[in-house]
Amino acid sequence: MRRFVIGRARNLFETSRQNYQFQRPLLSSSQSPFRFLSSTPVADSPSSSPSSSSSSTMAPPVTVNTINPKVLECEYAVRGEIVSLAQKLQEEIQTKPEAHPFEEILYCNIGNPQSLGQQPITFFREVLALCDHPSILDKSETQGLFSADSIDRAWQILDQIPGRATGAYSHSQGIKGLRDTIAAGIEARDGFPADPNDIFLTDGASPAVHMMMQLLIRSEKDGIFCPIPQYPLYSASIALHGGTLVPYYLDEATGWGLEVSELKKQLETARSKGITVRALVVINPGNPTGQVLAEENQRAIVEFCKQEGLVLLADEVYQENVYVPDKKFHSFKKVSRSMGYGEKDISLVSFQSVSKGYYGECGKRGGYMEVTGFGADVREQIYKVASVNLCSNISGQVLASLVMSPPKVGDESYESYSAERDGILSALARRAKTLEDAFNKLEGVTCNKAEGAMYLFPRIHLPEKAIKAAQVAKTAPDAFYCRRLLSATGIVVVPGSGFGQVPGTWHFRCTILPQEEKIPAIVTHLTDFHKSFMDEFRD
Amino acid sequence: MRRFVIGRARNLFETSRQNYQFQRPLLSSSQSPFRFLSSTPVADSPSSSPSSSSSSTMAPPVTVNTINPKVLECEYAVRGEIVSLAQKLQEEIQTKPEAHPFEEILYCNIGNPQSLGQQPITFFREVLALCDHPSILDKSETQGLFSADSIDRAWQILDQIPGRATGAYSHSQGIKGLRDTIAAGIEARDGFPADPNDIFLTDGASPAVHMMMQLLIRSEKDGIFCPIPQYPLYSASIALHGGTLVPYYLDEATGWGLEVSELKKQLETARSKGITVRALVVINPGNPTGQVLAEENQRAIVEFCKQEGLVLLADEVYQENVYVPDKKFHSFKKVSRSMGYGEKDISLVSFQSVSKGYYGECGKRGGYMEVTGFGADVREQIYKVASVNLCSNISGQVLASLVMSPPKVGDESYESYSAERDGILSALARRAKTLEDAFNKLEGVTCNKAEGAMYLFPRIHLPEKAIKAAQVAKTAPDAFYCRRLLSATGIVVVPGSGFGQVPGTWHFRCTILPQEEKIPAIVTHLTDFHKSFMDEFRD
């Protein structure tokens, strides 16, 4: 009987294969559907043959030589070897405080503000707590513990969640009501309409970037344009997805300027090597470089992407982090729309995160991407990939809606909220200036202004002797310098080689996040270390 | 000068390439390092050449024909076409209540308990709220709003977080103190030691599964053994990572038994096709099949993986969902260790999630994988991949520690906690039995017992006429049945073809999650629909 049924199934399968949801994922291109269907159960016909590879019993199933080589290729310097060394030193300090010439490790390697003492925005945390435990919302004690507008906002948010179920999977793009709020926030920011159906809420910006790389990269012949220096998420994600990073260099001499002439030249070079460049990544404000793009520069970039048929991937997670009066953040969506380019003219993805800005809620893993200028069929594919992970975490979704719609004038929390926000942003601006000045005072060091973001990327002109010593130590010269800095001061920074730099130039990335009371000591330790390093290696 | 520096850099590069963290990700295997290094900045030498492809201005940069074909191949039935239709119907009901013969859509397609009214465990939510807004911890009103042990637990957790910063990125494997708690929970469950350094906290179990697929799959020649029927996350993840799903069939006749003879036969078939089978996925308790494996069966599976050198990927997210007195959950780690197999003998990954069990916190995206039996160098690679996404969300991490360490006898919350837990689990058991009986009463329908998990997977013996009608409608017969069911009753179930089934047999997956007061109506509607369907198509 079953045999007959199977026979019928095969005919069915051959006549209308495309309608079988399931078999398709099973079929790698090398397999014919029939070959898969032919492997039917045999549980009722016991197999007599013995294990065909008892030899494999000895060897472990997985070694570094047998894992996916793309995983091996991928590097992520921000949490790389220097950080591992730092963690080792931290343990040593705890067990033997006198083991090292410093009392603590200062993590200036990563944009993780709250790990260095930055406090979260009270209103945001009130709303999160109330959404996590809604049953206290109508208790009288709650009035005494929470601001009135945080209670109102929590009710609003709960009413936007089907069944007020904050523990349920949401729509794979995120809760519709929260996407409405975010779209309204984008409209208020840009002065151009935003569609909640273009918003994909994600666990921070990183998964959104991976999703786009997964969509765009077919093989190593597909290239993604990235700035050099770049944030290593991009090089890591491109490596994991098997594509090729096509570099364009930011011009340090003009404050990390992004020249379209450079884009054109590098595009030609890549095409001459048979690389199909699919997208251009722009990080604005810049990471690790801290520059804020001028609007006319952004227009030129939009024009270039339109001309060359490139998807514009706009990393705009530092949109709230601008520290100089003469610069302002403009989203690439606003810039393109103000040029008269709409949905049909340019494919643009904007990434935003709750981890940066004045909120710095890295641990909450909230963020979104706004996806515009793609066909409905491509959008469906993006939705499908999002749906495989079901949805992003609801607290992160709530937080993303809050950062795009903070308290307004007249709300009970407005004054405390704006005081907290301004306090954080002005302190960041002061620290950026102090560190920038300190770096520029060091022998052989030049440091561009941190106009925005959370980093400085000073250039070190290393003496020949230091470069030779690094060669002997089998490490990059800037990594050699950073390791020496860590061992001498406990200050953790990331070598420029982790971000990319003009060959033969050396840099490191240092965050502006340590608390203000610690900055003077950091400056002193940096200065002393640098002097002794130069004395040791000066040509 | 720069030219000289670059020249020197190239020499350095050739002499110690392996020490350059950065360039490696840029180099797809087809590129020589020199070819990348040769593309140096040209911003200072303006490019004269015009845009080389103004032709591409017209065509959109991305179409379904130019995206990653692996994305196109991937399917995820649990949120597939039937669910899209359901969402459409739901909107129609809201605008035109009389448009359809039902008042609401009943989502029995996905294990999302709180979306159907299941309440979260109060203690868990208290702790989450306090960790989100720690500044209320020492306020007097808090004593009135929160249980004493939730306050204590929140303090314990905060003390495990460096700087009590719940908004900071954590260690990429998750907060060490929480991993200690989870490891202790695993030890208490299994009676064998667990190492916190083997725990990787993730945003639900899905990203953990993706991470392992990414690590193991090199090409379509690498196969992953999956049960048929399977949970579509596996087929989707394997497709996205470009591998081949190697099926082994569960035997419906013996209550979805997992026969090692079937594993052996399918392994030989796969090897004869040139497929290297790397890992075996076992879902216990089963999804969609609901069976709980007997311990002797698990031993045979462990022995098979050891003999054949396969990584055992144990999906154990339903470990709390066992409904029959004669079956008990045993983790594969416990089973292997009780067989005397340790770290060196078997590579085993166990997946756990906060989304299932009695807690059902799907929206919190918490979970972990326990990774044992891999070399330190492979572990480093897993850590690197985890670090590219920085860390999983902290609320999910906290929740994962809570589900592995709930209130104990004597704690203030213990009674309310255990009452909530037992209420949920016994209600799930009752609903499973009611639906199972109802399905078995239907003409031509047979349904195995739901021993565990959250699903029933009844088999429908569809009449020839229905199968022909499905062919005409260009859909799989079971999808045809499910769509008819939805249109007639508003009940959403997932066709068996989304999970895989013996060719020529037809099933659907129905969750046991609707609230108890709704079950009688569901049974009536199912029964009436099925009768009229059979009347329409009976041969």
Image: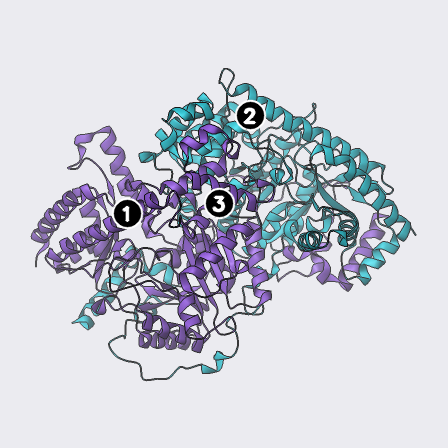
Chain colours: A cyan, B purple
Q: Which amino acid lies under the numbered mark 2 shown in the image of this protein?
A: Ser
Q: Is residue A280 visible?
A: yes
Which tag is nearer the camera, tag 1 or tag 3? Answer: 1
Q: Is residue A208 visible?
A: no
Contact? badges 2 and 1 (CB < 8 Å): no
Q: Which amino acid lies under the numbered mark 1 shown in the image of this protein?
A: Ile
Please state, as top left, top right, bottom left or bottom right, where the C terminus of chain B lies in the image. Answer: bottom left
Q: Chain of mark 1?
A: B
Task: Name the foreground residue: A194 vs B449.
Answer: B449
Image location (x, y in percent) of residue B54: 58, 40
Q: Chain of mark 3?
A: B
- Total labels: the figure holds 3
Disc 1, SS: helix
Image location (x, y in percent) of residue B522: 17, 45
Contact? badges 1 and 3 (CB < 8 Å): no
Q: Is residue B237 above or below residue A521?
A: below
In the picture of the structure, the residue carrying the numbered disc 2 is A338
Report how far apart the C-alphas of labels 2 and 3 lie in the structure: 23 Å
**To which quarter of the image does residue B453 belong?**
bottom left
Report how far apart the C-alphas of labels 2 and 1 lie in the structure: 55 Å
In the picture of the structure, the residue carrying the numbered disc 1 is B424
In the picture of the structure, the residue carrying the numbered disc 3 is B62
Image location (x, y in percent) of residue B14: 76, 62
